[in-house]
Image (cartoon, rainbow, N blue to C red):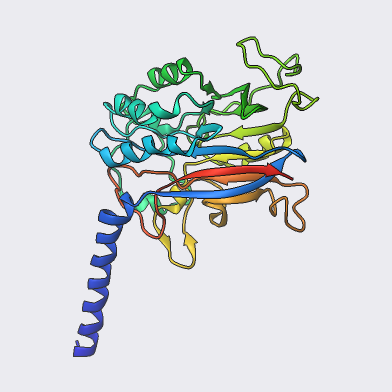
Amino acid sequence: MSSRLLTAAGTLAAAGVAAFAWASLVEVRWYALREVTVPVLPPGQDPLRVLHLSDLHLVPSQRRKIDWVRDLATLRPDLVIDTGDNMAHPDALAPLLHALEPLLDTPGAFVMGSNDYYAPSAKNPARYLLPDARRESLPAGELPAGELATALCAAGWRDLDNRRDTLVAGGRRLALVGVDDPHLDRDAFPPPLDPPFDGPDRPDGDHLPDDASPSGVDLRIGVAHAPYRRILDEMQADGAELILAGHTHGGQLAVPFYGALVTNCDLDTRRAKGLHGWPGARPDEPGGADSTWMHVSAGLGTSPYAPVRFACRPEATLLTLVAR
């Protein structure tokens, strides 16, 4: 081999080592707060601030992540939506609730992901490059999803796993619909409420201000862990004006200036993270009049068996909803 080829090979090897070190030692812990504005509220309404959390994949030793999540309460959001995959260890429940504790006084809602039900396990890293890397059988190690749901509901958050609910946040009444994890085929889209939500009060005591929307609902939100196309279609057909999901990790290993290579579901890679329209252009773009706003979070964690991120920082997002 010529000296030039040897030099080139050495340079590539060094670049690979540097990239892996960056992805596994720096970027995977370089948490980012994204901020986006969504013109989705009825005309004349004041902004509504929604904190979207997803894919913490928490293990008890991740003190920096726990402290970073706790500090999000200083943003003073009007609403918190958690789109699942919170745990990655059998002993993660108590640290997770400690991380979420400052946010639990804020109105919130959640759905579960696969890594709320089952602990991650070692697998071939090449599986992450498959378009939809679902397992043929369920993992063996169960996680305390039931205890997590009980704790969050006790704090007043709404469980949207194959359910509908309403809540009041920031003086607005929100109609929520959610599904259990589509990645595990646990989703069953809930039927419409009968009678539908109307009037200013809920039996649990939520009360709207006197100038609330006369229809009784200011915004309809769909919530899912994994943004499979069938779920997005059902939510859009159901009238959701904003859909929130996670699961994709934004591709986790992205190519600079190109983006994600995979989404781990059937969503296209162009919409692996961030704010988009579904099924077409964004509602504020030409041709997007029949689309719904959709936000996909790249999430805050990874499987402990693949603790790397490249060109895709771990994130939470503060969405400021404003009038159309």
Q: Is residue 12 left or right of residue 241?
A: left
Percent of width and height locating residue 36: 57, 49
Most distant residue in the top direction: 203
User: Residue 79, relative to residue 323: is it above or below?
Assistant: above
Q: Work out whether residue 69 or residue 313 is closer to the camera in this orientation and state it.
A: 69
Is any atom of residue 2 visible in this view? no
Q: In which quarter of the image is residue 139?
A: top left
- Identify the residue at horizontal 33%, vertical 27% (top origin): 98
- Identify the residue at horizontal 73%, vertical 27% (top origin): 217
Q: Work out whether residue 44 or residue 128 is closer to the camera in this orientation and state it.
A: 44
Q: For the C terminus, which image quadrant?
A: top right
Q: For the N terminus, which image quadrant?
A: bottom left
Q: Work out whether residue 291 or residue 114 is closer to the camera in this orientation and state it.
A: 291
User: Residue 176, relative to residue 292: is it above or below?
Assistant: above
User: Residue 255, relative to residue 4: is it above or below?
Assistant: above
Percent of width and height locating residue 202: 66, 13
- Identify the residue at horizontal 68%, vertical 38% (top origin): 46
